[in-house]
Image: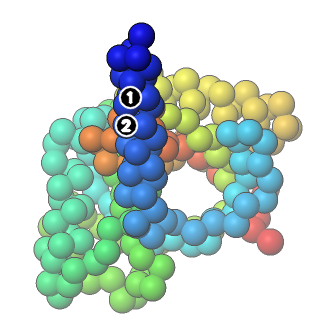
Amino acid sequence: MKRIWLGILIVTVGALLLAAGCRTMRGAYESAPYRPVRSEGKFALRDYPALTVVETPMAGSDGGDGSFLRLFRFLTGDNARKQQIAMTTPVFLTGSSSHRTMAFVLPAKLPAGAVPAPSDRTLAVRELPAGRFAVLRFSGGRNAQNEAAALSRLQAWLAQEGLTARSGPVYAYFDPPWTPVFFRRNEVMLRIDGEKPE
């Protein structure tokens, strides 16, 4: 009986340490800034400022075409100035499964005009306009089924709140792929019709 309780204790402590480690790793990176407007459980309304991103098209929905590595190489010096740029969170995915884009948010201290030109012609630097977004936080692996379920929940919440989306979904992923799926922070975001940041 003592061995069973010892085993349970070890597993529990291990899980808590793993969870703390995942949160610490995520917290080590600058994250896209926003101002909370309202929250209701896992749903939220947020005002985002304009964000500068570097983005690339994805050949498939899973990033197996090297899209993540192209963006990562840009940050590690594969750009016109050979400048190293800090990694941030989240990684944004937009578009349909047949025509997706992956984007890294660039650090706030690096305004659009100061971003070095990418050496890779499949990358582009652009500014995402400021706006108000409805957001749902969800966990689990990055796959079409989880994304569709999260989007459906967010759309149902918008309908309940009498709000209208004015763009397609943006999926935001905050954790590296080796993070256990139940500890991952993922979000789906929809720009809200008629709402502007205060």
Residue with the most extreme top position: 1
Give percent across and percent down for residue 15. Answer: 41, 35
Q: Secondary structure at mark 1?
A: helix
Figure disc tally? 2
| Residue for badge 2 | 14
Looking at this view, is 11 or 49 the one in front?
Answer: 11
Q: Position of residue 174 (x, y in %)?
A: 43, 51
Q: Residue 93 in the image: x percent, y percent?
A: 41, 47
Asked if the residue under mark 1 is in contact with the one under mark 2, i.e. CB atoms within 8 Å, the reply is yes
* Disc 1 target residue: 11
Q: Position of residue 135 (x, y in %)?
A: 64, 46
When asked about the image quadrant of residue 154, the answer is top right
- The residue under the point 27% across, 41% down is 178
Q: Say which quarter of the image contains residue 165.
A: top right
The amino acid marked with disc number 2 is Gly
Q: Is residue 93 left or right of residue 44?
A: left
- Residue 111's place in the image compared with 50, above or below, is below
Assign a secondary structure to mark 2. helix
**As shown in the figure, which amino acid type bears the numbered disc 1?**
Val
Q: Quadrant of the C terminus?
A: bottom right
**Residue 105 visible, this orientation:** no
From this view, report whether residue 120 is shown above or below residue 159: below
Q: Nearer the viewer, residue 169 or 12?
A: 12
| 10 Å crowding of disc 1: few (<14), some (14-19), many (20+) | few
Q: Nearer the viewer, residue 15 or 114?
A: 15
Classify residue 9 as left or right of residue 81: right
Residue 6 makes an appearance in the image: yes
Using residue 178 as the reference point, say whether residue 137 is left or right of it: right
